[in-house]
Amino acid sequence: MAFERLNEYAAEKQKLCTEHDTISDALFREYGVNRGLRDINGKGVLTGLTRISKIVSFKDENGVHEPCDGELWYRGYNINTLINNLNGGFGFEKTAYLLIFGELPTDEQLAEFNDIMSECRVVPSNFTRDVIMKAPSHDIMNSMTKSILTLSSYDENISSNDIDNCIRQCLMLTAVFPMLAVYGYHAYNHYENDGSMYIHRPAPGLSTAENFLRMLRPDTCYTSLEARVLDIVLMLHMEHGGGNNSTFTTRVVTSSGSDTYSAIAAAMSSLKGPRHGGANLKVMQMMQDIRTHIGDPTDKDEVEDYLRKLLDGEAFDRKGLIYGMGHAVYSISDPRERVLKSYVQKLAEAKGKTADMTLYENIEDIAPKLIAEKRRIYKGVSPNVDFYSGFVYDMLGIPVELYTPLFAIARVVGWSAHRIEELVGMGKIIRPAYKSVMEEIE
């Protein structure tokens, strides 16, 4: 077997790494270092300033820091306001313009932006055949990252960090991300699963959500409700502050002076991590386990009994977690989940999934109380956006391999906005300090 000796060598040496690289909690406390740049209450350590978005989870009432219903703001606009003002239209492109350029577009500006994005939905000649279809991967995030870095070789002005050049590159990547994801999946499904191969080109004049469904499905068909629900999901995932792992990665790499393709590829590598972008997969796996082990999803007592087993580490993956509950920032509520739920209900009714919706709602009602009781958590616990997003993808017939890539299709807009803001205003390489606790030998 190739590299058998290397594998044995690595297995033999792993104990040395564990022995010499473990740092005790006591040392972190002694030097006042917060693991993960988060304090004892889970709040992120302040490391930067941004005008792109705002997350609200606490408010000061009479000098007291009190948890509140979560709020998410994009460039001064509450996410609820942006969605409520769509008036039946699609919001992803309009919100992309807002996040990247800092203001809402006029109808004329939006039409121009949509035309430009439509023109950018093209990859170089033979790129799909020579790059995406060769060496297909079951990990579509890796496939997309490979494609992103390969696209850089077609860019004659790859290294310039002039703002106009950065805008050009970011818009191009945002436009082709759905193609990279869907084509990467079709290549994997064909060559690894013996599925049928079909490559549909994006259609001019369609939104990102519409084109994604069109390219994914064999018959290119979708309903208006399906496209609009997916559009809302994309809007809710576009941006979430500068401190989330992938966006912070974007800013760190940007601060070094590296190019757009490298910064976005680094963000992709961050997002694919199970602690960041893969949470909705865990929710779906947990929900399947719950369906398997309970007889009546409408029986709240039966649901509660099984949730207690989950928390006690006696069911599913035995980690004592109810996935989709709680958030690192929000306490009383995740505003994205609040918005998404109403659209999920409409889609579930249209798809004949009301029994599944009832199960989700029962868990949403019961789980926070059990978690607070079991963990003695006094910060509020509520469902996060991942609780319902996987259910939406499942109802839309989107394969699990594309769950995290869909997150990336939305979040590349936020990464782009933060890259531009970093280039415009910061000017210094991000270089935090590490305290050495090494023992001197001689």
Image (cartoon, rainbow, N blue to C red):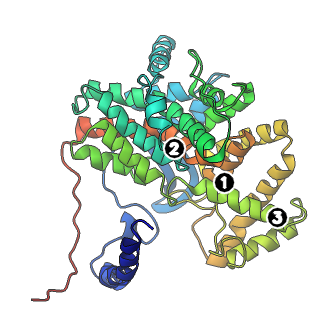
Mark 2, residue position: 136
Q: Name the residue type under label 3.
A: Thr
Mark 3, residue position: 292
Asked which secondary structure carries label 3, the reply is helix
Along the viewing direction, whichever of 2 and 414 lies nearer the viewer: 2
Q: Name the residue type under label 1.
A: Phe
Spot occupied by residue 264 in the image (x, y as percentages of width and height): 37, 41
Spot occupied by residue 389 in the image (x, y as percentages of width and height): 65, 47
Asked which secondary structure carries label 2, the reply is loop
* Residue 102 visible: no
Query: Sequence order check: which comes first, mark 3 or mark 1?
Result: 3
Along the viewing direction, whichever of 264 and 60 lies nearer the viewer: 264
The Cα–Cα distance between marks 3 and 2, rounded to whole angstroms, is 33 Å
Q: Quadrant of the N terminus?
A: bottom left
Q: Name the residue type under label 2.
A: Pro
Asked which secondary structure carries label 1, the reply is helix
Residue located farthest toward the front when viewing the structure as drawn: 1
Mark 1, residue position: 387
Q: Nearer the viewer, mark 3 or mark 2?
A: 2
